[in-house]
Every structure is written in structure tokens, then in C-alpha cells.
Amino acid sequence: QVQLVESGGGLVQPGGSLRLSCAASGSIFSISYMAWHRQAPGKERELVAGITSGGTTNYADSVKGRFTISRDNAKNTVYLQMNSLKSEDTAVYYCNLRSFVGNNYWGKGTLVTVSS
């Protein structure tokens, strides 16, 4: 069974930075697609960034140039570096693992609040 635990959320001022981490249990991390999604109040969950097992990344247009996703397979951890944060980035951020057979696993989320 895969478990995902996010950390690194918090309150930050506009223009600031945060780094989210997601630690995964289990043995399939290194061969799985990893992603960060977010859900703002009153909105649907949306994909923020993803990274394949080989390191290929994809980003939502709204975060391109500001956010960077990376992974450390030795630590079973995926990161989301968020720079130049805006108020509209305020949301609960969820870590997602999609296995090679298509199973999806989710963390419980970490809250990011961008406010002065």
C-alpha cells in the first residue's frame, strides 16, 4: 500500500517562496508518475505540475516559470518549489502518485496561504 505525506505548507506573503515535499512509502515510487494538484475554496482540484519516472515535467500554464517540480528517487520524495507566489495560489496542495498500472494514490494535502 502506498502512503503519501505532504509537508511544507504555510502562510507566505505575495512574492514569497515555499517548498513542498511529499514522502512516499512503498517500492513503486521510482517507476511512478508523480504530481502536485491543488484545490482552492469553491473550485475544482487542478493539476499544478507532474514529473515522470524519467524526469520529464509538465506544468499548468498558471505556474510556468514560477514553480518547479523535482524528485529524489533515493529518498522516495517529490518536491514543489514555488516562487513568486500570488494570492491566487492559495489552496490545499495534494501529492499524487499514479502507478504504471494506473492506480492513483493521494496524500491528505497541505495548506498554502498567500496573503499579506
Image (cartoon, rainbow, N blue to C red):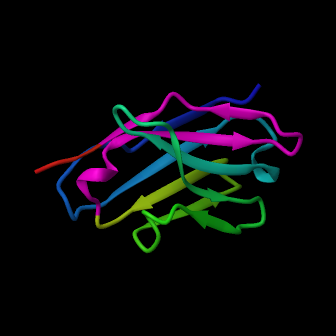
Q: Position of residue 30 (x, y in %)?
A: 77, 52
Q: Nearer the viewer, residue 44 or 95?
A: 44
Which residue is pictured at 34% across the width and 65% down the height?
A: 83
Compared with 50, 22 (above or below) is above
Q: Nearer the viewer, residue 93 or 79?
A: 93
Q: Position of residue 13 (x, y in %)?
A: 17, 55
Which residue is pictured at 56% across the width and 63% down the height?
A: 59
Q: Quadrant of residue 27?
A: top right
Q: Nearer the viewer, residue 24 or 43?
A: 43
Task: Say left or right for 37 vs 27.
Answer: left
Q: Position of residue 80 (x, y in %)?
A: 48, 56
Which residue is pictured at 26% across the width and 58% down the height?
A: 86
Q: Residue lying furthest right in this view?
A: 101
Task: Say left or right for 10 vs 62.
Answer: left
Residue 107 is covered by the magenta coloring: yes
Q: In the image, which residues are magenta?
A: 85-112
Report the number of numbered marks.
Answer: 0
Task: Say left or right for 82 vs 60.
Answer: left
Compared with 108, 64 (above or below) is below
Q: Residue lying furthest left in this view?
A: 116
Q: Quadrant of residue 28?
A: top right
Quadrant showing the N terminus:
top right
Which residue is pictured at 62% across the width and 65% down the height?
A: 58
Residue 108 is covered by the magenta coloring: yes
Task: Say left or right for 31 vs 61.
Answer: right
Q: Residue lying furthest bottom in this view?
A: 65
Q: Position of residue 22 (x, y in %)?
A: 55, 43
